[in-house]
Amino acid sequence: MMKPKILISRSWPDAVQQRLAACYDVTLNAADTPMTITQLRAAMAEYDAVCPTVSDKMPAEVLAAPGARVRIIANYGVGFEHIDLEAAKAAGIVVTNTPDVLTDTTAELAVLLMLMTSRRAGEGERELREGRWVGWRPTHLLGQSLAGKTLGLVGYGRIARATAMRAKAALGMRIAYYSRRRATDGDGATYYETLEGLAAASDVLSLHTPGGAETHHLVDAALLSRMKPTAILINTARGSVVNEVDLAQALTDGVIAGAGLDVYQGEPKVNPVLLAAPNTVLLPHLGSATLETRTAMGMRVADNLDAFFDGKPPHDRVA
Ligand code: 8YV
């Protein structure tokens, strides 16, 4: 039997590439650059499976391409708002993602951003490297302690809970959350029925919702104005959840005290207003960036492909 023909859109960790090469006729994107709409449309007619990442946009224009051979889009990543699920369903294409395996790693990054932002670590490192450090003094780069403070989680899924667990156990924070429904197993976290209520009560507000139309610009000037002037915002979810212009203005005007961001609208471009805003820690979408996790994500894609081409339901089907 002919091996299914699959396209891997970016360079993946070696162990995964080796596993896939043993069972599939694999094409790799040697250039390791985001694929264009034209390239992805052409790929639809050439492969049995396409394995994209967050950097490959797959709108209806791609998924409804005439003469498509692709039967499964096996996404490398848990977030899938770059794939038009309705268009995939209409075209009879299965879509899978990679949940669970990046939960702990992304939670670690959320905690890293909380600490870096509250303790002004980015500012301090830049000062030292640029030779501007003039020595110890009692009022140098004073930040805020997180112990006893309230971490407000927007969304209460896997990554939010893993972040809460770390913040509570390691940093001694209180946990609160807002989500559409109160969790039946809240782990002692305080539930807020409104996002505004959570924003007003939080010392750190951390975003853990999916991207997409429902969460677009959930954090805007109106919400930021509810926050404490000492509060910080953390975003390891999706850039589209935050109105970046409103956030930059709020930071400049002292409406909130700081922001730690890992994701942006229009990545890899970062809005210059954010670069210019005070008290920001800006990381280049590193949420799941460990060798263990990026390998596990690839293995999860391989598991989904194996099931699908074996005629079984893939574990992580989202459409
Ligand atoms: C991934 C992520 O690296 O999985 C996600 O949703 O945001 C990242 O951690 C990236 O999206 C892979 O496509």
Image: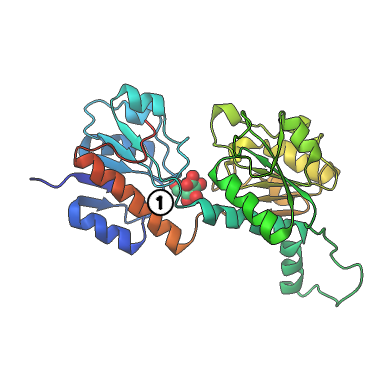
Residue occupying image coordinates x 55% and y 35% = 211
Q: Which colour scheme is used?
A: rainbow
Q: Given the image, on which type of amino acid does mark 1 rest? A: Thr
Mark 1 surroundings: few (<14), some (14-19) or many (≥20) residues within 10 A: few
Residue at the far left in the pictured view? 1
Would you identify the image quadrant in which residue 136 lies?
bottom right
113 left or right, relative to 38: right
Q: In which quarter of the image is residue 2?
A: top left
Q: In which quarter of the image is residue 227?
A: top right
Q: Is residue 254 above or below residue 142?
A: above
Horizontal and vertical percent position of residue 31: 35, 55
Residue assigned mark 1: 33
Q: How many labels does the image show?
A: 1
The x and y percentages for residue 190 are 72, 39
- SS under mark 1: loop
Q: Kindly identify the residue that appears in the image at 77 percent across and 61 percent down.
A: 119
Judging depth in this view, the residue of 272 and 285 nearest the camera is: 285
| Viewer-side residue, 56 vs 130 | 56
Task: State left or right for residue 255 relative to residue 75.
Answer: right
Instruction: Give the residue at the far right of this rendering.
Output: 138
Residue under the image location 68 percent in, 61 percent down: 170
When the figure is inspected, residue 201 is found, relative to residue 60, above or below; the finding is below
Whether ligand 1 has any atom under 8 Å from the Cβ at mark 1 is answered as no
Name of the residue lying farthest toward the top: 90
Q: What is the x, y in percent for residue 36?
A: 38, 40
User: Is residue 274 placed above or below 209 in the rendered structure?
Assistant: below
Q: Residue at x 79, y 51 (%)?
A: 149
Q: Where does residue 49 sit, x and y in percent of width and height?
A: 26, 41
